[in-house]
Image: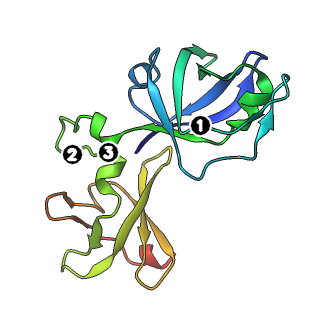
Amino acid sequence: MLIVGRIGKPHGIRGEVTVEVRTDEPEARFALGKVLRTEPGAVPPPAASEHGEAFRVPAELVVESARWHQGRMLVAFEGIPDRDVAEALRGTLIGVDSGEVAAPEDPEEFHDHQLVGLAVVNPGGDRLGEVARIEHAPSSDLLVLRRPEGGTALIPFVKAIVPEVDLAGGRVVVDPPAGLLDL
């Protein structure tokens, strides 16, 4: 699953929620009728709506409406009738099937799901670990490296430190400055 957003707090009383957008194409991803999957395991305890029925986060949410308001994406999903039920969605990651997403045209651009799980090696070919996930920081994206001896390391995903991504070979070449992996 390709994560396109994280549901935030409810907005208003009619079930609308704020969404922390994690996609370059929000208008396409949050279009009317678009089906978004929820992250497995991101299920908060059931909430009761004003009508008294319990609610659990469904495996899929269908976009009923989406709009920008003061720099934030506000989304209403089908079946989310009020603020109480919308509160149960808070923190849920939402995404699309990776198979639905076309590969980037730029050969130097990658989707997160293409990188997760790749072996990370130094220029000499020594294994440093594997890509656990991608963190999207304000200054640059970070590869979260799962180290073989346990723990993680953060590697700025910039050409000077990550000179090669070999999707076909299943590896990412990293030339870290001294001490970067020791932090």
Picture quarter containing residue 180?
bottom left
Report which residue position mark 2 lands on.
108
Residue 174 visible in the snapshot: no
Decide: is 127 above or below 43. below
- Please count the marks in the image: 3
Q: Amino acid at mark 1?
A: Pro
Dot 3, how many residues are within 10 Å of its Cα: few (below 14), some (14-19), or many (20+)? some
How are the colours assigned in the image? rainbow
Percent coordinates x, y for residue 152 in the rendering: 49, 72
Residue at image point 28% right, 70% down? 119
Q: What is the spatial separation of the Cα atoms under label 1 and label 2, in whole angstroms?
A: 36 Å
Residue at image point 29% right, 64% down? 118
Label 3, secondary structure: give it.
loop
Percent coordinates x, y for residue 65 in the rendering: 55, 14
Q: Amino acid at mark 3?
A: His
Residue nearer the viewer, 54 or 128:
54
Report which residue position mark 1 lands on.
58
Q: Which of pointers 2 and 3 indicates the residue nearer the eye?
A: 3
Residue at image point 38% right, 77% down? 178
Label 2, secondary structure: give it.
loop
Task: Report whether 120 appears left or right of 89.
Answer: left
Upstream in the sequence, badge 1 or badge 2?
1
Decide: is 183 above or below 86. below
Q: What is the spatial separation of the Cα atoms under label 2 and label 3, in whole angstroms?
A: 10 Å
Report which residue position mark 3 lands on.
111
